[in-house]
Image: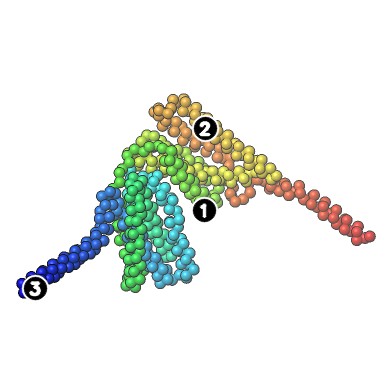
Amino acid sequence: MGEEAKLQVHSEGEEAKLQIHGEEGEEVQESEHNDRICSSICAPVNWFKMLAMELHWSFVFGVVIVYGISQGLGGAFSRISTEYYMKDVQKVQPSESQVYSGITSIPWIVKPLWGLLTDAVPILGYHRRPYFLFAGFLGFVSMLFLSLHKNLHIVLALLSLTAGSAAVAIADVTVDACVAQNSGSHPSLAADMQSLCALSSSIGALVGFSLSGILVHLLGPMGVYGLLSIPAGLVVLVGVLLKESQTHNFAYQQEYIGYISAVASIGALLGAILYQYGLKDHSFRDLLFWTQLLFGLSGMLDLVLVLRLNLKFGIPDYFFMVMDASVSQMVGRLKWMPLLVLSSKLCPPGIEGTFFALLMSIDNTGLLTSTWGGGLLLHVFKITRTKFHNLWLAILIRSILRITPLSLLFLVPRSDPNSSILPDEMSDSKETIDTPATQNENIELVALVHNMDTR
């Protein structure tokens, strides 16, 4: 009996131990399960904290706002509300709605222009923050304007929708520039930043499309436009909070000079458009008078830069240089276009190529003479690579010389630019010369046919 009692006690002890170990195992498994849940929840939070510590929290905030709220959520709201706005409020046909949709997407086609501005045209020393502020205010005003005007003309509605689209595009380009800049300084986090952008955009679009139909049903498309002013306001907040170092001095590097020339070419393009749609029907003399006068006055902008007057008004050197180059290119194009038209009209029949080339060679001779004269002027005033004391005087003389051609403007006809300038007998000379030959050919042909018939 004693051995049986011992065996029973031993077995009961083993069962108790197994039960205790089983309970401990279940507790360990439950603890591991809870740890997995906690780690899966905390991992994104820790990831956000890591990005905020390495890249600054304002950058992470800007990416979430621009990609998640402005593009994802706001883009979904805007797409659905615009479809119903065109159908129910403007009452346009589907084909017209497609055309209007293409017009509002133009700001996304010219995204390189916004990128060029953010890189090459700093405002008050900042490259990114002013463009976030501008994009936010533009989107806020355009969406609020759409929501408050019920019977809005289709042209004004298109302008407002295009302005709102431009606001989102500018914010998108600016935040992309921030991402690219941080990818260069933190290459190990480049993939994480792209993941942050994609996740923010996808989650925002998911939430936006899920709620857009309900909000359009409850508030109407104009009410949704009113809600879209909130993402635009948050973009303004990004411009206020973004951490960005201010550039006080501008280094005249080769890439910046290229940027200035690129932006200046936009001024030349605007000049060509302005001439085509607004000035081509004006008389040559009047148009050349005002363009030559503006050409001389535009040269005074260089004087403002040399005398550092732009800094007294708070305008950075680089921004002023871009503005100066754009204005000069636009005025130069406006001055050159009527001269080309006038030169082409002055060419006599039969020698058009020779005469037009002669006129262009005269112009090229003038450019060569001005280049040599400018070099002589710099030598006389002892302006070198390191001495600029008399540069203002050379600029003043150049600007005055630009106005001197006005004294010869009386030689330019004041006639209608759409009519012929050459005398009638000169313009008809070729036809007069060709007429007898044509008549002789016809006479000979008639005589031959007549002789064959008589045989």
Q: Amino acid at mark 1?
A: Tyr
Q: Quadrant of residue 232?
A: bottom left
Q: Quadrant of residue 301?
A: top left
Marker disc for residue 4: 3
Determine the secondary structure under disc 3. Answer: helix
Does label 2 or label 1 sit earlier along the sequence? Answer: 1
Determine the secondary structure under disc 2. Answer: helix
Disc nearest the viewer among 1 and 3 = 3
Marker disc for residue 277: 1
Does label 1 or label 3 sit earlier along the sequence? Answer: 3
Does label 3 or label 2 sit earlier along the sequence? Answer: 3
Determine the secondary structure under disc 1. Answer: helix
Disc nearest the viewer among 2 and 1 = 2
> Which quadrant is the N terminus positioned in?
bottom left
Q: Is residue 213 above or below residue 421?
A: below
Q: Residue at x 33, y 41 (%)?
A: 247
Distance from disc 2 to disc 1, alpha carbons, whole Å, reads 33 Å
Q: Amino acid at mark 3?
A: Glu
Is residue 359 in view?
Answer: yes
Marker disc for residue 156: none
> Which quadrant is the C terminus positioned in?
bottom right
Q: Is residue 99 above or below residue 196?
A: below
Q: Amino acid at mark 2?
A: Thr
Marker disc for residue 371: 2
Q: Residue at x 60, y 36 (%)?
A: 362
Distance from disc 3 to disc 2, alpha carbons, whole Å, reads 122 Å
Residue 164, horizontal then vertical, whole percent: 38, 59
